[in-house]
């Protein structure tokens, strides 16, 4: 579990909104699944999940940009003695947030499509 937390923290501050949006999206999808199981078909709330699915990869790209900015800052701040190892934290942040945004979006996408198609079958 510590490895997951370390990886999350290495992703930088953009990981927090990705996490929060993922929790919100999963909660809404669970709620909608329970409604469907009870026989109630209502598309309310699904637009929020659709927006989250769209926003999470963009947040991943934002994390990529901030990570690369951190990399260039580390390389430029070295006073002409650029140390390639100083770039690794920023590159790591960039890759972690990109992957997190894509994975979080994909996890929501498939159940969203199933629930959305069932709510439209009236």
Image: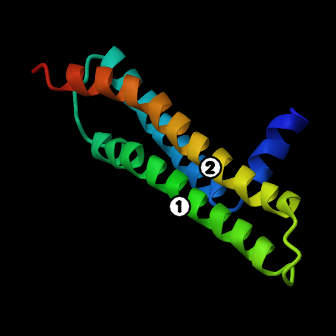
Give the class, few, some or many, for how many residues have Cα within 10 Å of label 1's Cα (few <14, many ≥20).
some
Q: Which mark is residue 33?
A: none
The part of the image, by quadrant, that contains residue 2 is top right
Residue at disc 2, secondary structure: helix
- Identify the residue position indicated by label 2 in the image: 97
In three-dimensional space, the C-alpha distance between marks 2 and 1, rounded to whole angstroms, equals 8 Å
The image quarter containing residue 112 is: top left
Q: Is residue 38 above or below residue 99?
A: above
Q: How many marks?
A: 2
Q: Residue 17 at x, y = what percent? A: 58, 57
Task: Identify the residue at the far front of this view.
Answer: 80
Depicted 121 relative to depicted 79: above or below: above
Residue drawn at point x = 35 percent, y = 15 percent: 37
Q: Is residue 1 left or right of residue 102?
A: right
- State the quadrant of the N terminus: top right
Q: Earlier in the sequence, mark 2 or mark 1?
A: 1
- The residue at which mark 1 appears reads as 62
Q: Pick the quarter of the image with the C terminus.
A: top left
**In the image, residue 93 lies at what x, y percent?**
71, 54
Vertical arrangement, residue 90 with respect to residue 113, above or below? below
Residue at screen point 41% across, 47% down: 52
Residue 66, image quadrant: bottom right
Q: Residue at x 41, y 52 (%)?
A: 55
Provide residue 97's location: percent of width, then percent of height: 62, 49
* Visible residue check, residue 84: yes
State the residue in front, 70 or 58.
70
Q: Residues within 10 Å of mark 2 (few under 14, many from 20)?
A: many
Q: For numbered disc 1, what is the local secondary structure?
A: helix
Asked if the residue at tag 1 contacts the one at tag 2, i.e. Cβ–Cβ closer than 8 Å, the answer is yes
């Amino acid at each position: 579990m510590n490895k997951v937390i370390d990886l999350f923290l290495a992703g930088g501050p953009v990981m927090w909104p990705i996490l929060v949006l993922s929790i919100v999206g999963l909660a809404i999808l669970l709620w909608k699944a329970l409604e469907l199981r009870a026989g109630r078909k209502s598309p309310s709330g699904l637009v929020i999940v659709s927006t989250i699915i769209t926003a999470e990869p963009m947040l991943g790209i934002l994390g990529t940009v901030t990570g690369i900015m951190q990399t260039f800052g580390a390389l430029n701040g070295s006073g002409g003695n650029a140390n390639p190892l100083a770039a690794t934290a920023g590159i790591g942040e960039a890759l972690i947030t990109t992957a997190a945004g894509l994975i979080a979006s994909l996890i929501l996408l498939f159940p969203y499509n199933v629930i959305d198609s069932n709510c439209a079958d009236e």
